[in-house]
Image (cartoon, grey):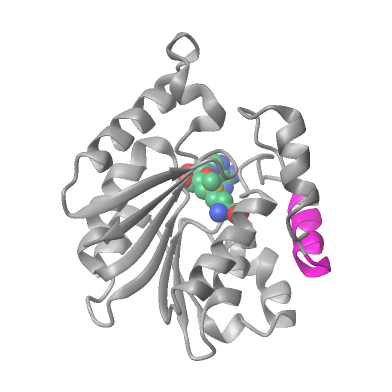
Protein backbone atom coordinates (compact mmCIF):
# COMPACT_ATOMS: atom_id res chain seq x y z
CA UNK A 1 0.00 0.00 0.00
CA UNK A 2 1.70 3.18 -1.09
CA UNK A 3 0.46 6.11 0.95
CA UNK A 4 3.40 8.51 0.57
CA UNK A 5 2.12 11.06 3.06
CA UNK A 6 1.81 8.50 5.85
CA UNK A 7 4.56 7.09 8.05
CA UNK A 8 5.93 4.12 5.99
CA UNK A 9 5.49 1.80 8.97
CA UNK A 10 1.81 2.72 9.13
CA UNK A 11 1.44 2.05 5.39
CA UNK A 12 3.13 -1.32 5.83
CA UNK A 13 0.84 -2.18 8.73
CA UNK A 14 -2.23 -1.22 6.72
CA UNK A 15 -1.08 -3.39 3.80
CA UNK A 16 -0.46 -6.35 6.10
CA UNK A 17 -3.99 -6.08 7.48
CA UNK A 18 -5.93 -5.56 4.25
CA UNK A 19 -7.00 -8.04 1.55
CA UNK A 20 -4.56 -8.41 -1.35
CA UNK A 21 -5.64 -7.88 -4.97
CA UNK A 22 -6.46 -11.23 -6.57
CA UNK A 23 -4.52 -12.80 -9.47
CA UNK A 24 -6.77 -11.24 -12.12
CA UNK A 25 -6.20 -7.69 -10.85
CA UNK A 26 -2.45 -8.38 -10.55
CA UNK A 27 -2.40 -9.71 -14.13
CA UNK A 28 -4.23 -6.65 -15.46
CA UNK A 29 -1.87 -4.32 -13.58
CA UNK A 30 1.14 -6.20 -15.01
CA UNK A 31 -0.30 -5.99 -18.54
CA UNK A 32 -0.81 -2.22 -18.09
CA UNK A 33 2.81 -1.80 -16.95
CA UNK A 34 4.04 -3.60 -20.08
CA UNK A 35 1.85 -1.57 -22.44
CA UNK A 36 3.62 1.30 -24.21
CA UNK A 37 1.89 4.67 -23.95
CA UNK A 38 0.36 4.05 -20.51
CA UNK A 39 2.17 6.42 -18.16
CA UNK A 40 3.24 4.78 -14.88
CA UNK A 41 1.39 5.93 -11.79
CA UNK A 42 -1.91 6.88 -13.41
CA UNK A 43 -3.66 3.63 -12.58
CA UNK A 44 -5.40 3.60 -9.20
CA UNK A 45 -3.63 1.84 -6.34
CA UNK A 46 -4.64 -1.60 -5.07
CA UNK A 47 -6.16 -0.10 -1.92
CA UNK A 48 -8.23 2.36 -3.94
CA UNK A 49 -9.41 -0.55 -6.08
CA UNK A 50 -10.44 -2.55 -3.06
CA UNK A 51 -12.24 0.47 -1.66
CA UNK A 52 -14.14 0.99 -4.94
CA UNK A 53 -15.34 -2.61 -4.97
CA UNK A 54 -16.39 -2.54 -1.31
CA UNK A 55 -18.16 0.82 -1.45
CA UNK A 56 -20.03 -0.18 -4.62
CA UNK A 57 -21.09 -3.41 -2.92
CA UNK A 58 -22.07 -1.59 0.29
CA UNK A 59 -24.14 0.94 -1.69
CA UNK A 60 -25.85 -1.97 -3.51
CA UNK A 61 -25.20 0.06 -6.64
CA UNK A 62 -27.00 -0.81 -9.86
CA UNK A 63 -26.01 2.24 -11.89
CA UNK A 64 -22.43 3.49 -11.89
CA UNK A 65 -20.37 5.91 -13.97
CA UNK A 66 -16.62 6.21 -14.38
CA UNK A 67 -14.42 9.00 -15.74
CA UNK A 68 -11.95 7.79 -16.96
CA UNK A 69 -10.87 4.13 -17.14
CA UNK A 70 -7.40 4.32 -18.86
CA UNK A 71 -6.10 0.81 -17.98
CA UNK A 72 -9.53 -0.57 -17.06
CA UNK A 73 -8.28 -1.56 -13.57
CA UNK A 74 -10.65 0.78 -11.73
CA UNK A 75 -13.39 -0.33 -14.13
CA UNK A 76 -12.91 -3.96 -13.10
CA UNK A 77 -13.00 -2.98 -9.40
CA UNK A 78 -16.23 -1.00 -9.83
CA UNK A 79 -17.94 -3.57 -12.06
CA UNK A 80 -17.21 -6.35 -9.58
CA UNK A 81 -19.02 -4.40 -6.86
CA UNK A 82 -22.18 -3.87 -8.90
CA UNK A 83 -25.20 -6.07 -8.55
CA UNK A 84 -25.48 -8.73 -11.27
CA UNK A 85 -27.88 -6.65 -13.37
CA UNK A 86 -25.88 -3.45 -12.76
CA UNK A 87 -24.45 -1.15 -15.44
CA UNK A 88 -21.19 0.79 -15.38
CA UNK A 89 -20.91 3.49 -18.03
CA UNK A 90 -17.30 4.55 -18.62
CA UNK A 91 -16.28 7.74 -20.38
CA UNK A 92 -12.87 7.55 -22.03
CA UNK A 93 -11.01 9.70 -24.52
CA UNK A 94 -9.53 6.68 -26.25
CA UNK A 95 -10.15 2.97 -26.82
CA UNK A 96 -7.25 1.89 -24.60
CA UNK A 97 -9.34 0.32 -21.84
CA UNK A 98 -11.33 -1.75 -24.30
CA UNK A 99 -8.28 -3.26 -25.94
CA UNK A 100 -6.21 -3.65 -22.79
CA UNK A 101 -8.70 -4.72 -20.16
CA UNK A 102 -11.51 -6.44 -22.07
CA UNK A 103 -10.08 -9.98 -21.61
CA UNK A 104 -9.80 -9.39 -17.85
CA UNK A 105 -13.34 -7.99 -17.64
CA UNK A 106 -14.51 -11.12 -19.49
CA UNK A 107 -12.57 -13.48 -17.25
CA UNK A 108 -14.11 -11.77 -14.21
CA UNK A 109 -17.57 -12.28 -15.73
CA UNK A 110 -18.37 -8.55 -15.63
CA UNK A 111 -17.82 -7.48 -19.27
CA UNK A 112 -21.60 -7.47 -19.83
CA UNK A 113 -22.01 -4.81 -17.11
CA UNK A 114 -19.61 -2.34 -18.76
CA UNK A 115 -20.59 0.19 -21.41
CA UNK A 116 -17.81 2.32 -22.94
CA UNK A 117 -18.45 5.82 -24.27
CA UNK A 118 -15.44 6.85 -26.31
CA UNK A 119 -14.71 10.44 -27.32
CA UNK A 120 -13.97 13.84 -25.77
CA UNK A 121 -15.24 13.35 -22.21
CA UNK A 122 -16.43 16.92 -21.58
CA UNK A 123 -18.58 16.69 -24.74
CA UNK A 124 -19.93 13.17 -24.10
CA UNK A 125 -20.64 13.38 -20.38
CA UNK A 126 -23.67 15.71 -20.71
CA UNK A 127 -25.32 13.00 -22.88
CA UNK A 128 -25.62 10.75 -19.82
CA UNK A 129 -29.34 10.08 -19.24
CA UNK A 130 -30.94 11.27 -15.98
CA UNK A 131 -32.88 8.02 -15.62
CA UNK A 132 -31.79 5.80 -14.02
CA UNK A 133 -30.06 8.04 -11.48
CA UNK A 134 -26.45 7.19 -10.70
CA UNK A 135 -25.74 5.32 -7.45
CA UNK A 136 -21.93 5.53 -7.60
CA UNK A 137 -19.75 7.80 -9.74
CA UNK A 138 -15.96 7.57 -9.85
CA UNK A 139 -13.86 10.45 -11.15
CA UNK A 140 -10.16 9.83 -11.79
CA UNK A 141 -9.13 12.65 -14.07
CA UNK A 142 -6.68 15.52 -14.48
CA UNK A 143 -7.01 17.95 -11.55
CA UNK A 144 -8.06 20.76 -13.88
CA UNK A 145 -11.07 18.71 -15.10
CA UNK A 146 -12.40 17.52 -11.73
CA UNK A 147 -14.62 20.54 -11.13
CA UNK A 148 -16.23 20.31 -14.58
CA UNK A 149 -16.89 16.56 -14.26
CA UNK A 150 -18.26 17.04 -10.72
CA UNK A 151 -20.56 19.83 -11.92
CA UNK A 152 -21.90 17.72 -14.79
CA UNK A 153 -22.26 14.51 -12.78
CA UNK A 154 -23.81 15.77 -9.52
CA UNK A 155 -27.32 16.37 -10.99
CA UNK A 156 -27.23 12.77 -12.29
CA UNK A 157 -26.50 11.35 -8.83
CA UNK A 158 -29.38 9.79 -6.91
CA UNK A 159 -30.26 11.35 -3.58
CA UNK A 160 -27.97 9.42 -1.23
CA UNK A 161 -25.73 8.52 -4.18
CA UNK A 162 -21.95 8.63 -3.85
CA UNK A 163 -19.26 10.30 -5.92
CA UNK A 164 -15.64 9.29 -5.37
CA UNK A 165 -12.88 11.53 -6.66
CA UNK A 166 -9.32 10.15 -6.74
CA UNK A 167 -6.05 11.98 -6.30
CA UNK A 168 -7.49 14.76 -4.16
CA UNK A 169 -4.53 14.86 -1.74
CA UNK A 170 -2.04 14.89 -4.63
CA UNK A 171 0.05 12.34 -2.69
CA UNK A 172 0.24 14.81 0.21
CA UNK A 173 1.41 17.84 -1.83
CA UNK A 174 -1.97 19.49 -1.26
CA UNK A 175 -0.99 20.46 2.30
CA UNK A 176 2.57 21.58 1.49
CA UNK A 177 2.21 25.02 -0.09
CA UNK A 178 5.94 25.24 -0.93
CA UNK A 179 5.82 22.24 -3.25
CA UNK A 180 2.61 23.12 -5.07
CA UNK A 181 2.36 22.87 -8.84
CA UNK A 182 -0.47 24.02 -11.11
CA UNK A 183 -2.36 20.73 -10.85
CA UNK A 184 -2.14 20.78 -7.05
CA UNK A 185 -3.51 24.34 -6.96
CA UNK A 186 -6.38 23.26 -9.24
CA UNK A 187 -7.15 20.31 -6.98
CA UNK A 188 -7.07 22.58 -3.92
CA UNK A 189 -9.65 24.87 -5.57
CA UNK A 190 -11.78 21.84 -6.35
CA UNK A 191 -11.52 20.56 -2.75
CA UNK A 192 -12.47 24.01 -1.40
CA UNK A 193 -15.50 24.25 -3.65
CA UNK A 194 -16.79 20.75 -2.85
CA UNK A 195 -16.33 21.31 0.89
CA UNK A 196 -18.46 24.48 0.59
CA UNK A 197 -21.21 22.82 -1.52
CA UNK A 198 -24.28 22.49 0.70
CA UNK A 199 -25.86 19.93 -1.66
CA UNK A 200 -23.43 17.27 -0.43
CA UNK A 201 -21.63 15.75 2.55
CA UNK A 202 -17.90 15.22 2.09
CA UNK A 203 -15.14 13.15 3.63
CA UNK A 204 -11.51 13.09 2.46
CA UNK A 205 -9.90 9.68 2.92
CA UNK A 206 -6.20 8.80 3.08
CA UNK A 207 -6.60 6.03 0.50
CA UNK A 208 -4.04 5.97 -2.32
CA UNK A 209 -3.18 9.50 -3.47
CA UNK A 210 -6.24 10.77 -1.60
CA UNK A 211 -9.86 9.83 -2.19
CA UNK A 212 -12.79 12.16 -1.55
CA UNK A 213 -16.15 10.55 -0.91
CA UNK A 214 -19.11 12.84 -1.61
CA UNK A 215 -22.70 11.93 -0.71
CA UNK A 216 -25.53 13.87 -2.33
CA UNK A 217 -28.23 14.89 0.17
C1 LIG B 1 -5.77 8.97 -13.93
S1 LIG B 1 -6.07 8.16 -15.41
C2 LIG B 1 -7.29 6.98 -14.99
C3 LIG B 1 -6.72 5.73 -14.41
C4 LIG B 1 -7.73 4.63 -14.25
N1 LIG B 1 -8.73 4.95 -13.27
C5 LIG B 1 -7.06 3.31 -13.93
O1 LIG B 1 -7.26 2.74 -12.84
O2 LIG B 1 -6.30 2.85 -14.79
C6 LIG B 1 -7.01 9.25 -16.38
C7 LIG B 1 -6.34 10.55 -16.64
O3 LIG B 1 -5.05 10.31 -17.16
C8 LIG B 1 -4.75 11.32 -18.10
N2 LIG B 1 -3.75 10.78 -19.01
C9 LIG B 1 -2.47 11.15 -19.04
N3 LIG B 1 -1.79 10.46 -19.97
C10 LIG B 1 -2.67 9.62 -20.57
C11 LIG B 1 -2.59 8.66 -21.61
N4 LIG B 1 -1.45 8.40 -22.25
N5 LIG B 1 -3.69 8.00 -21.96
C12 LIG B 1 -4.86 8.26 -21.34
N6 LIG B 1 -5.01 9.15 -20.35
C13 LIG B 1 -3.93 9.83 -19.96
C14 LIG B 1 -6.06 11.66 -18.75
O4 LIG B 1 -6.09 13.01 -19.12
C15 LIG B 1 -7.08 11.37 -17.66
O5 LIG B 1 -7.48 12.55 -17.02
In this picture, residue 71 sits left or right of residue 162: right
In the image, is residue 26 part of the stretch drawn in magenta?
A: yes
Residue 2 seen from this side: yes
- Please name whichever residue, 128 or 52, is drawn nearer the observer in this view of the structure: 52
Residue projecting furthest to the left: 198
Rendered image quadrant of residue 175: top left
**What residue do we see at 37% from left, 58% from top?**
163
User: Residue 115's x, y, as percent?
Assistant: 48, 77
In this picture, residue 159 sits left or right of residue 90: left
- Quarter of the picture containing the N terminus is top right
Residue projecting furthest to the bottom: 85
In the rendered image, the vertical position of residue 172 relative to residue 79, given as above or below: above
- Please name whichever residue, 72 or 137, is drawn nearer the observer in this view of the structure: 137
In the rendered image, the vertical position of residue 3 relative to residue 62, given as above or below: above
User: Residue 55's x, y, as percent?
Assistant: 51, 66
User: Residue 168's x, y, as percent?
Assistant: 45, 38
**What residue do we see at 28% from left, 82% from top?**
132
- Please name whichever residue, 76 or 61, is drawn nearer the observer in this view of the structure: 61
Rendered image quadrant of residue 127: bottom left
Q: Which residues are magenta?
A: 22-33
Rendered image quadrant of residue 161: bottom left
In the image, is residue 194 part of the stretch drawn in magenta?
A: no
Residue 96 seen from this side: no
- Quarter of the picture containing the C terminus is bottom left
In this picture, residue 134 sits left or right of residue 181: left
Main secondary structure of the magenta stretch = helix
User: Residue 183's x, y, as percent?
Assistant: 42, 27
Residue projecting furthest to the top: 178
**What residue do we see at 48% from left, 33% from top?**
169
In the rendered image, the vertical position of residue 148 relative to residue 62, given as above or below: above
**What residue do we see at 57% from left, 45% from top?**
207
Amino acid sequence: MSVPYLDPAVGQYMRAHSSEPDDLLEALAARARETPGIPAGLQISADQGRFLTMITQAARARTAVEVSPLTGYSTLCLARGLSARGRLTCFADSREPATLAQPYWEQAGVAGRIVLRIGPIAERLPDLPFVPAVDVAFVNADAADCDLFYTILLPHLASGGLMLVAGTLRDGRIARPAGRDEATRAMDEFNESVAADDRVGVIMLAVGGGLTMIRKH
